[in-house]
Image: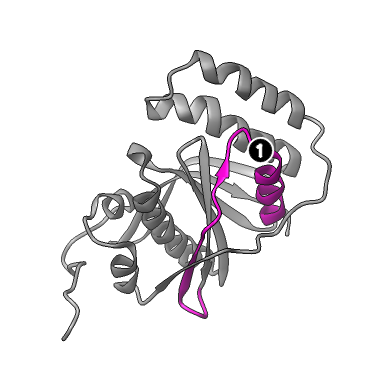
């Protein structure tokens, strides 16, 4: 029995379109000839010191009881942006926010955050606290970025602010690997930072 085609040749799709689709992530990625593999990943980690970690963790822990995180803006400004900017400061990497990318009619839109040094790392915020659909969007963005930058291997992360999940694109194997491990902020902040820095400087 042949699989029903999801994407139409005469239609254009933005990265956000894939978040909105009612299909399973593996079905959407199969349209691009990629398989989705869920497993516990061994991620690069930095061994460098994190001198501002205690202050960053304290800042987040003190603000959490006082602020409602019901809006995407609140989560972005209070939980995501402080982590991203600390990574940028430590790695001295380029940061692009809402970075436009247009590969073709099926692969275009804006990347929430793009960090660039030795390696590129894209981070997206999952809308409506939906990590599953958010990961689908991340996977499509990684495919677009790999074509634009001609990279065989790329890492990305999807977050709802308090929770982060990593993924890896392997172009030669035509696979997107979804990490089973979830990292929480502020509890796993040290490990999260070491992974983000490890990926960029690996």
- Residue at x 62%, y 17% (from the top left corner): 62
Q: Residue furthest top?
A: 66
- Residue at x 31%, y 48% (from the top left corner): 16
Residue 112 forms part of the magenta stretch = no
Quadrant showing the C terminus: bottom right
Residue 70 quadrant: top left
Could you say which is closer to the camera, residue 8 or residue 42? 42
Residue range in magenta is 171-200
- Residue at x 73%, y 44% (from the top left corner): 91
Reading the image, the residue beneath label 1 is 189
- Residue at x 33%, y 62% (from the top left corner): 25
**x, y percent for residue 46:** 77, 52
> Where 6 falls versus 182 (above or below)?
below
> Where 22 falls versus 184 (above or below)?
below
**x, y percent for residue 115:** 60, 47
Quadrant showing the N terminus: bottom left
């Amino acid at each position: 029995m042949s699989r029903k085609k999801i994407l139409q040749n005469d239609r254009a799709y933005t990265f956000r379109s894939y978040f909105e689709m009612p299909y399973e992530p593996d079905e959407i990625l199969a349209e691009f000839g990629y398989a989705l593999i869920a497993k516990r990943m061994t991620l690069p980690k930095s061994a460098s010191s994190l001198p501002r970690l205690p202050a960053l963790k304290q800042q987040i822990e003190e603000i959490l009881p006082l602020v409602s995180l019901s809006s995407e803006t609140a989560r972005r400004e209070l939980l995501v942006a402080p982590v991203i900017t600390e990574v940028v400061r430590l790695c001295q990497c380029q940061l692009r926010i809402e970075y436009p990318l247009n590969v073709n009619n099926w692969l275009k839109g804006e990347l929430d955050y793009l960090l660039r040094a030795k390696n590129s790392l894209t981070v997206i915020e999952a809308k409506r606290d939906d990590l599953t659909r958010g990961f689908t969007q991340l996977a499509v963005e990684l495919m677009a970025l790999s074509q634009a930058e001609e990279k065989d291997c790329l890492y990305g992360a999807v977050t709802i602010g308090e929770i982060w999940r990593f993924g890896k694109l392997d172009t030669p194997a035509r696979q997107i690997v979804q990490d089973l491990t979830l990292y929480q902020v502020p509890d796993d902040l040290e490990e999260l930072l070491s992974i983000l820095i490890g990926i960029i400087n690996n």
